[in-house]
Image (cartoon, grey):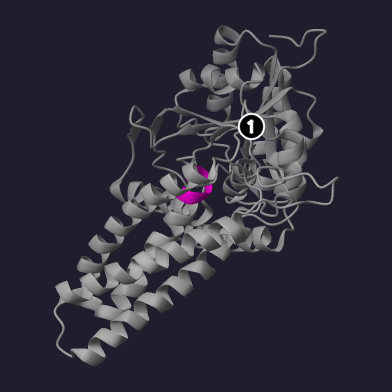
């Protein structure tokens, strides 16, 4: 479909590097599909990042022969470079990219871009890890993919399920705001974009896809995994330092609650804190019993408290004190860990005292003492969480409360 006077709705970028074997077949298939199925105006951009084979010749011929196909040449290798170059030059409303092997079934393309064209979502991704996704790939790549995405969700506190599927789209105004803050120009480009988007309060839409692994893929899985892990460490450090302005992006583009929630009353906070505390105590007890045998009493106590502390702080932040959004998220988690250390000191001291009185104390006696100590630690936690960690704060803008508002400080 030729672009109308209303402008270009969708630009699909296909990054390529030495893809002479499959380029013509894939681009022809994609163009034919779009001609038949896509009602919005569209363009395919072949983004060549420094190919040294016959790819440029084939790409130029395709751009001359096929409707709405253009060719861009970049004299530097890297998928991130290719996407950055093409997206920055685009005038389309929605920007997308597909892997040249078309491993993802093209039937997922219309639902991928529809929520972006309508303005409902900011970023849209295909996921191979959804319950209704259908995926054909070897066990090694399946294990690596699931392990990487699990690690990503746990370390970066994100909820999207599949960071690496080569089937994504983004609204142009969002891309232009985020791209300057993405440092990676290789395979980690996707992950970094998604982390920044979610941590900035943008809406990420996921659709399950049918995906067939390309047996001729030349991606070095091991090196890519190492680079991705390095990227995670780097992005985490950038968020800690505040060099990625997620709060500013949140203030400009982020999705806020339809009705900003108010803070619960004091009685409501006590009740909710008690429920969270009860659940945390049960989780602590179960973890302690599991960890006590292999690690010993003191180490098991520390690990059980540490594992429950992070979840407890997150639950109290949202459920007990009614705080949402990324504002001060890292600071509050850090303060929660300080409170955890105080609680650990109390419970650890109780164990030391017990063992001084009874060297051969049974695990059941240890657990009883620890439970009592946890009650005292819980009271201390509530006071500190309410008065220090999640207490109402005043900013510099007319004394407005900012406990539920974005602020210019790092979030992780």
Q: Is residue 205 magenta?
A: no
Left or right: 121 as drawn, with respect to 136: right
Q: Establish if 395 lies above or below 121.
A: below
In this picture, which residue range is highlighted in magenta?
A: 315-319
Which residue is painted at 54% across and 17% down in the image?
110
Q: Establish if 322 lies above or below 118.
A: below
Closest to the observer, 6 or 32: 6
Which residue is tagged 1? 260
Q: Main secondary structure of the magenta part?
A: helix
Q: Establish if 192 lies above or below 137.
A: below
The answer to whether residue 193 is visible is: yes
Give the percent coordinates (x, y) of residue 226.
50, 63
Closest to the observer, 340 or 200: 340
Give the percent coordinates (x, y) of residue 389.
59, 59
Closest to the observer, 60 or 112: 112
Which residue is painted at 35% across and 75% down in the image?
347
Left or right: 222 as drawn, with respect to 83: left
Determine the secondary structure under disc 1.
loop
Closest to the observer, 300 or 319: 319
Give the percent coordinates (x, y) of residue 277.
37, 54
Q: Quadrant of the N terminus?
A: top right
């Amino acid at each position: 479909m030729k672009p109308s006077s209303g402008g270009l709705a969708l630009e699909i970028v296909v990054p390529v590097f030495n893809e002479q074997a499959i380029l013509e077949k894939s681009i022809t298939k994609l163009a034919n599909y779009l001609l038949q199925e896509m009602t919005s105006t569209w363009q395919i951009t072949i983004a060549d990042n420094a190919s040294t084979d016959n790819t440029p010749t084939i790409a130029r011929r395709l751009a001359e022969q096929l409707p709405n196909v253009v060719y861009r040449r970049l004299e530097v290798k890297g998928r991130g470079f290719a996407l950055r170059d093409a997206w920055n030059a685009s005038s389309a409303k929605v920007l997308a990219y597909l892997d040249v092997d078309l491993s993802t079934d093209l039937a997922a393309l219309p639902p991928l871009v529809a929520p972006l064209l309508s303005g409902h979502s900011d970023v849209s991704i295909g996921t191979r890890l959804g319950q209704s996704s259908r995926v054909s790939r070897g066990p090694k790549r399946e294990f690596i993919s699931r392990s990487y995405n699990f690690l990503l969700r746990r370390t970066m506190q994100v909820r999207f399920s599949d960071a690496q599927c080569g089937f994504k789209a983004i609204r142009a105004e969002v891309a232009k705001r985020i791209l300057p803050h993405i440092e990676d120009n290789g395979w980690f480009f996707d992950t970094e974009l998604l982390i920044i988007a979610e941590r900035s309060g943008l809406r990420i839409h996921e659709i399950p896809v049918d995906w067939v692994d390309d047996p001729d893929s030349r991606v070095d899985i091991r090196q890519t995994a190492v680079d991705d892990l390095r990227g995670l460490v780097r992005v985490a450090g950038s968020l800690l330092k505040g060099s990625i302005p997620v709060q500013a992006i949140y203030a400009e583009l982020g999705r806020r609650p339809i009705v900003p929630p108010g803070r619960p009353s004091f009685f409501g906070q006590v009740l909710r804190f008690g429920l969270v505390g009860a659940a945390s105590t049960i989780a602590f007890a179960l973890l302690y019993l599991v960890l006590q045998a292999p690690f010993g009493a003191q180490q098991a106590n520390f690990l059980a408290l540490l594992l429950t502390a992070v979840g407890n702080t997150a639950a109290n932040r949202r459920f007990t004190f009614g705080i949402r959004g990324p504002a001060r998220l890292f600071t509050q988690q850090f303060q929660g860990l300080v409170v955890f250390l105080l609680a650990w000191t109390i419970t650890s001291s109780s164990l030391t005292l017990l063992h001084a009185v009874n060297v051969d104390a049974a695990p059941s006696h240890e657990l009883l003492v620890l439970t009592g100590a946890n009650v005292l630690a819980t009271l201390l936690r509530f006071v500190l969480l309410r008065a220090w960690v999640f207490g109402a704060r005043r900013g510099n803008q007319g004394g407005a409360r900012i406990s539920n508002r974005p602020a210019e400080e790092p979030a992780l």
